[in-house]
Image (cartoon, grey):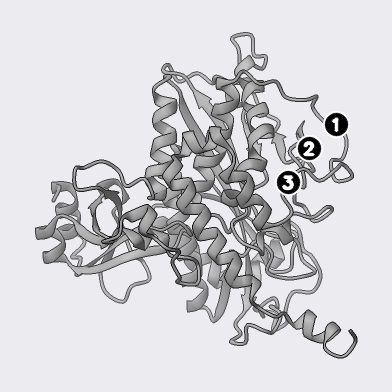
Amino acid sequence: MTEPIAQLIAQHHIHEVECVIPDMTGIARGKILPKDLFLSAGEMRLPKSVLLNTVNGQQPDNGPYVGDTDPDMICKPDPATFRIVPWAAEPVAVVIHDCLEPDGSPVSLSPRAVLRRVLDLYRQRGWQPVVAPEMEFFLVARQQNPHEPLHPPIGRTGKPEAGRQSYSIDAVNDFDPFFMELSNFCTIHRLGVETLIHEAGAGQMEINFAHGEPLELADRVFLFKRTVRETALRHGIFATFMAKPMEAEPGSAMHIHQSLLDTDGRNLFSQSDGSASPAFFHYIAGLQSYVPQVMPMFAPYVNSYRRLAPYMSAPTNVRWGYDNRTCGIRIPQSTPVNRRVENRVPGVDVNPYLAIAATLACGLQGMLEARQPDEALGSSAWNLPHELPRHLEDAIELLRACTPMRELLGTQFVEAFCAVKELEFGTYNRVISSWEREHLLLLV
């Protein structure tokens, strides 16, 4: 065990350690170990097939991906991810682990390994990606019946939020106790949260992260989701990161701002005279070409595609424009040193490791191929043709057939990820909805 973690455990009087890994859905899997066992063992072992769990706990036939014997993988703690669990009743720490084969090589099915793989391709060229996620989520009233629609919670006024309150300070203040505790938890958890606003939907909020190194940001997003849900439960409400939780309200996105630095820390998207560089346009073209091919990583569930509708603050294509929020790819106003690209396609229901890996892979491939984007759009993109897959089933087929993305992300990973998504889609497709019972039962 590394000395820094041992020192931190002693310093904070830690009793237990949550040893976690993110699976393909972004759910935390792992073990809770007493501190002495954690320190003496220095690692934990989990079946490799744990990475293949669907969101509802099933697994596809995992033999082709992990072997017929379902062997263990070695999970090594990453000291940089050590954090105090602020809502625990006694001193507890959480540490994210890397998944390794017995020979020490990364497990290709691990989302963290997929992101590391893409980042290594950048580093080989002397480039350092920088990302900054924006995360939207809904606060909703607690309910136990999944067949009932969700509703905004009741705040300090004693009334649920009526209508939409974009950027309303008072609407945020209605849940002051929740946000004060969330802010405190984020500080203790070292999540680097910057700003909080009220988004367009009733009970919909957005929190932005300070920009930084992609793997470290993915770790923070992974931990942030759990922090928000835990805080909400403490205040008698639910927090949801579904992409489209309510029929009449906008969906929730995880917009990803991204730029590249060279070895001297200069922005590769800008030239010395301040103008946009060829790499900037190649990167945009890569997103335009390949975002539709990796949609299962930006829209991983059936519900995700309900968000991607015109006039609902979500893109339906991969057009790009300067400060144009109707486009899938937006270029925010900035100085040359801060020139960046915003991918507005991902929903907030994504696995952050995979969404960040996918958007960086798309941009990288555009640079490798020296692709050129179409003209920047200065008008609304909502009336233009739909350029993204409309359903998860179609998106899976596109990803499986995309050779460049298979090579960048790893062929075995892509095959296994598609198998997980296909199983989830098949499970969903067996469900008879309330709409079908209401409109078809006695009328057809």
Residue visible at 30% across and 60% down?
A: 68
Q: Position of residue 11 (x, y in %)?
A: 17, 58
Image mark count: 3
Tell us which disc is closer to us: 3 or 1: 3
Q: How far apart are marks 3 and 1 (CA)?
A: 20 Å
Q: In the image, is residue 326 above or below residue 262?
A: below
> Which residue matches tag 3?
388
User: How far, Cα to Cα, is label 2 from label 1?
Assistant: 7 Å
Q: Does the CB distance between marks 3 and 1 fall below 8 Å? A: no
Q: Which of 267 and 37 is in front in this view?
A: 37
- SS at badge 3: loop
> Helix, strand, or loop for circle 1?
loop
Which is nearer the eye, 270 or 362? Answer: 362
Q: How crowded is mark 1: few (under 14 residues within 10 Å), some or many (20 or more)?
A: few
Label whose residue precedes the other's in the sequence (3 or 1): 1
Q: Position of residue 284 (x, y in %)?
A: 66, 28
Residue linked to disc 1: 378
Which residue is pictured at 54% across the width and 81% down the height?
236
Q: Name the residue under label 2.
A: 324
98 and 271: which is toward the camera: 98
| Left or right for 261, reference 200 | left
Q: In which quarter of the image is residue 36?
A: bottom left
What amino acid type is highlighted by mark number 2?
Asn
Residue type marked 1: Gly
Q: Do the residues labelled 2 and 1 touch (CB within 8 Å)?
A: yes
Measure how far apart labels 2 and 3 are at the Cα level: 18 Å
- Say which of 388 and 162 sits in front: 388
Please name the amino acid that badge 3 sits on: Leu
Where residue 139 appears, x then y in whole percent?
62, 70
Judged from the image, the secondary structure of the residue bearing numbered disc 2 is loop
In screen coordinates, is 250 left or right of 444?
A: left
Mark 2 or 3: the one toward you: 3
